[in-house]
Image (cartoon, grey):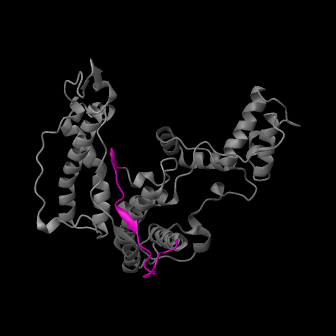
Amino acid sequence: MNRQQSNKPVSADAGLRIPGSALKRKWAVGQGDTDAAIAELIRAFLGKVLDEHLAQLPVDLDKRHELAQRIYNRQQKGTAIRTLDRHWTLSELESRDVSIELLEQMDAYQRGKQAANQFQPEVYARAILCVYSDELERVAATSYGRHQENCQEMLRLVRVLGMYLAQTEDCTRREHGSFFKPVNATWEPLRHVQWRHFWGKTPQSAFDDDLRFLVDEVLKYTFNALQGLHVPQEMLRARVMKRLHLNTLVPVIDVPERWAWEACGSSWDAYIANLYRSFEATWQSLLDVGICTADEIAAARNCVLKSLHVAIEQGRQQYKNQPRFKRLVCGKYYSEWGFKGYPAYLEYPPVSILPTTQSNVRLVA
């Protein structure tokens, strides 16, 4: 996207500008400069600011740097099973002249392997929507006018789209997990509607293609918003609203567990507050784009307490039906042998549930 935009002009309210005549040659980067040399330039240019940033937020190495560092460390410490044909410097290994495939072969050779396996970094990169969300929030706080409005609108759409993607991911791969973090609950607030198919069963490929189109559109205009370019706000919001519909505002609360109860200080007030805290960001994101109303969210908050009571009742039944409370003594069956009551985390919380009014009954679309 940066290459496509190149040096095309942008609107006057899209951030600050630096004229070419103000650039100093000593900070120029040459075609053959290594990553290490460029990093030294960045460090010299930023000075203390970079050191303070790195101290607060460690930066994960990319594939090339991590492989080069591993190979170089084995060479320096003499821990390689087999030594390379010559002594390599870290700058040479990090240079773009050495391909990733060659680095993988050198890494395998040092470890005594016959064939190189495809390198897997230890930490996976963040999803692009997560990065864009951070950038939109940052730019929206410092820009003004139309540039700020576009960033704020795209931030709302990115959060909702990221939320839907997060709820469709399994527990082993949560790339968009930062958008959707329900605590001690199961929740699918959104559903994807393939609006082009009005008859029969919609094939999964149609859903996948339509979702891919929506993600691509949001990514494209998010970049435009950050660059200060034109963003068709009404069209984009209509596209999102046409595809992502409200499924339910009320999470299904899980049966309370001892560790979760104790983590909240063995207090129902703290436990319930922790539940609400994990739901508020989702409710607010849905409200911001108009998928739900404030009255519906107020009703959903009350229904969370009802769902918690249902979960506690299920937990009480499971607890009481444990085999340790069942005994057959002298031909007589006892269903509550040794039962002395429920633990504190399965006692009902001392909170009242307000009746749901007619104005906020649409909790499921």
Pick the residue in front: 365 or 342. Answer: 342
* 47 to the left or right of 28: left
* 302 to the left or right of 74: left
Specify the farthest residue to the right.
85
Against 47, residue 12 (above or below) is below
The answer to whether one can see residue 143 in this image is no
Against 154, residue 298 (above or below) is above
Residue 207 located within the stretch drawn in magenta:
no
* 38 to the left or right of 214: right
Mainly helix, strand or loop, the magenta region? loop
* 27 to the left or right of 115: left
Q: In which quarter of the image is residue 297?
A: bottom left
Q: For the N terminus, which image quadrant?
A: bottom right
Q: Residue at x 81, y 37 (%)?
A: 113
Against 48, residue 2 (above or below) is below
Against 145, residue 285 (above or below) is above
Residue 197 located within the stretch drawn in magenta:
yes
Counting from the top left corner in percent of width and height, residue 284 is at: 28, 60
Counting from the top left corner in percent of width and height, residue 316 is at: 24, 36
Counting from the top left corner in percent of width and height, residue 334 is at: 24, 25
Range of magenta residues: 182-203
Q: Residue at x 66, y 46 (%)?
A: 120
Specify the farthest residue to the front.
331
The answer to whether one can see residue 214 in this image is yes
Marker count (numbered): 0
